[in-house]
Amino acid sequence: MGDAPPPTAARRTEALFPSTIRGLTAYAHQRGAINMGQGSPDFPPPPEVVEAARQALADGVHQYVPTWGLPALRQALSEKAQRFQGLAYDPETETTVTCGVTEAVISALLAVVDAGDEVVILEPAHENYHAGVVFAGATPIFVPIRPPTHRVDPDELAAAMARPGVRAVIFNSPHNPSGRVFDEDELATLARLCTQHDVVAISDEIYEHMTYDGHAHVAIATHPGMKERTITISGLSKTYAATGWRVGWAYAPAALTDAIRKVHDFTTICAPSPLQQAAVTAARLPDAYYEELRAFYRARRDRTVGMLREAGFEATPPEGAYYLMAGMERLAERLGRDADDQAFAHYLIDEVGVGTVPGSSFYRSDPGLGRGLLRFAFPKSDATLDELERRLAVLR
């Protein structure tokens, strides 16, 4: 009995990698660095939303709600989709509340992809897309969106989508980490290929309300034939500065919603009930809130770009979301430092006190595409940006 070998982990875990974002965030915190890498605001949600959460707790909203979401929230989310994108989703059969966008992505993949299928991932991409494909037992097919323009190559996308094993394509716009907002041509190409090859689109639109300089977010589900084959995902985290609340949602046609709900039910049961109640208030904030949000982030974007350029980074203002990919190779050369993005990210934490995320961590197919880039996130308070400016001064 004592000679039995120790147990081993499931083989699927061998394809997973620890999160670079969360790992470097923890390291930056340990070293006392400013967290400019992780997309987590350092200011609170809107006061009326916080008050709604406090009131929900005071009113005794502590127990389970229906697993697919508080009815009042599903109604508010259905109204929100109609209000901003002109899309009609039935709150009873086509709208599901999840434990954040991460769970929505995983549930969507498990709901539509079988073991042995293939899933196209447009990258650079958030780490959880690849993880979700692994959980589903599928194979990722990566289509790179190459710097510096970060535009979708229609020929590469067409070749990937034409593969007979492809069941789904997953992407997000406004795009993390590049800050691109996919234009009409890119969305039309995606829509045409999805309908041509009978592929489900999983569209992560968490940054839907963050667009700048005349760019506008358009949901791919608004394209002809796409509402019937699109799972649209969003959540509270970014728009309402509530990344720790873990309330997300997915819109999808009834048949796909039924599958998503089965996965969601047996993984998380329901998102936090008092925070779902507060999310009703968030979903019904007036248009002025979203206008102020765009102006607020545009100002932070412009200030961050300016500081990075003064410090020697190559930085272009993003079109949307609240990230930018900054080039660091020239700066590294001037400083006599290793131009590898992983090494330079550690240098910034250890010697400058600024945390970032290496660009290579967003590319699985060819990490070299992001090797000279670092992701900066700018959902930060004035005090944090003041301190960033002070710390970056040592690089000039």
Image (tube, rainbow, N blue to C red):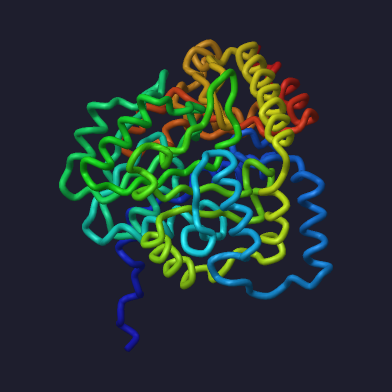
Viewer-side residue, 283 vs 373: 283
Residue located 61% across and 13% down the image: 309
Give x and y (percent) for residue 396. 65, 11
Give x and y (percent) for residue 188. 34, 30
Give x and y (percent) for residue 297. 67, 28
114 lies left or right of 318? left
Give x and y (percent) for residue 351. 64, 28
Can residue 44 be seen in the rendering of this structure?
Answer: yes
347 lies left or right of 203? right
Q: Is residue 308 above or below residue 111?
A: above
Q: Is residue 61 above or below residue 77?
A: below
Snapshot quadrant of residue 170: top left
Outermost residue toward the left in this view:
164
84 lies left or right of 150? right
Viewer-side residue, 351 vs 118: 118
Quarter placement of the N terminus: bottom left
Outermost residue toward the bottom in this view:
1
Residue located 63% across and 72% down the image: 65
Residue located 43% across and 28% down the image: 182
Q: Is residue 148 above or below residue 57?
A: above
Number of marks present in the image shown: 0
Can residue 346 be seen in the rendering of this structure?
Answer: no
